[in-house]
Amino acid sequence: MRHVAILVETARAYGRGVIRGIARYHRERGRWSIYFQPQGLGDPPPPWFTHWNGDGIIARIDNPKTARVIAALGVPVVNLRSTVQNLPFPFIGADNQAVARLAADHLLERGFKNIGLCRYPTGYHLGFDVRCDCLRDYVKQADCCWHELTLRRGHRRPTSWEKEQERIARWLADLPYPIGIVAINDDCGLQVLDACRRIGLRVPDRVAVLGCENDEYACGLSIPPLSSIDLNSEQTGYEAAALLDRLMSGNRPANPLPKIEPLGVIARRSTDILATDDMNITRALHFIACHACRPITVTDVVKHVRVPRTTLRIRIHKVIGRTIHQEIQRVRIARAQELLSGGSAPIKRVARECGFKNVQYFTRVFRRVTGHTPAAFRHARSIRQTTIL
């Protein structure tokens, strides 16, 4: 039985997802004795670690000191964080090019011609740098206006929270509207939304905000709730465990190492908008967003807007590329994804709360849109509470 240490934070959703993935691999294939205790990101290794005589380590290495302590043990290591450069360990992490593409598409599909980025300094996190560069390229290829603000996290002279919020607010006040803003992670997204509230910018009417990492607690803390990209950290943990098993058996890592595809955008209120000057379309889409789960029909939308059915159908399809019925279904499925990701309610209840008459029809529509059944979608995110170790 191999002895494996897991140095992964439990204070954040991403780290907990990683641990779920390691646990899944361990249940399926592992014959390990696991050394683990709850910790925060950047915490030093636990006291027992320097005298530990083990076989392998999975770690989210956040600082050079921790890297040196781990390297001194001379055992196989898999690293899951890219804030420290030039480490001698194989790295498993998100496909940040795919993350950038998802973020760009999410805002471009909503009609934004002005897109901004709120980020951390170059060099603070190599994965973030790739995400930023790719996003900038995608936006410019779409012939949209680009706006960027760099925060001071990791800076030698960090500023206070209040001064940073004032700085974000000044940046927001000078932007053209409407604008969609990508926050490099959910922490940054919370700051942007807070700054919007401070200066009275309506979200998502004037400013739409999209985060990354989909930390459900953080996303629900903001007003309005923050849309975010699910980075699929459970799969990262699973692949890391598989790689460590390979290394401990004396095999070389695969070349290239896998990049983990994100699961998709979890759309919440902060991006629930379409950037258009056609007020009839705006009214129709707002009505759908508010009432799609009651349920409603195309006729209800037409009656609310008071525009001829054919005229409204043509206008909406021209702007968003979907029919009125398809937009109703999109909103329902988005709500279903949120419920499936954030709780353990029975599938039948989720179907009912999202406006579907029966679970069979819900399952059929959900699978057509997402490629998964509702049960498989929930399992992929592993949000249900399980015994991890």
Image (cartoon, rainbow, N blue to C red):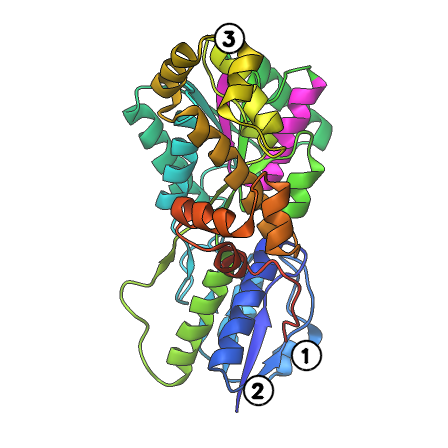
Q: Which residues are magenta?
A: 178-198
* For residue 236, above or below residue 96: below
Does the magenta segment cover residue 190?
yes
Which is closer to the viewer, label 3 or label 1? 3
Apparent side of residue 71 relative to residue 197 in the rendered image (left or right): left
| Residue named by callout 1 | 48
Give the x, y percent position of residue 227: 56, 36
Magenta stretch, overall SS: helix
Does the magenta segment cover residue 387?
no
The answer to which of 115 and 174 lies nearer the viewer is 115
- How far apart marks 3 and 1 lie (CA) works out to 64 Å
Q: Amino acid at mark 3?
A: Met
Q: Amino acid at mark 1?
A: Trp
- How far apart marks 2 and 3 lie (CA) works out to 67 Å
| Residue named by callout 3 | 279
| Residue named by callout 2 | 53
Identity of the residue drawn at 31% across and 77% down: 252
- The residue lying furthest to the bottom in this view is 1
Identity of the residue drawn at 43% across and 35% down: 103
- How far apart marks 2 and 1 lie (CA) works out to 10 Å
SS at mark 1 in the image = helix
Say if residue 263 shows up in the picture: no
SS at mark 2 in the image = loop
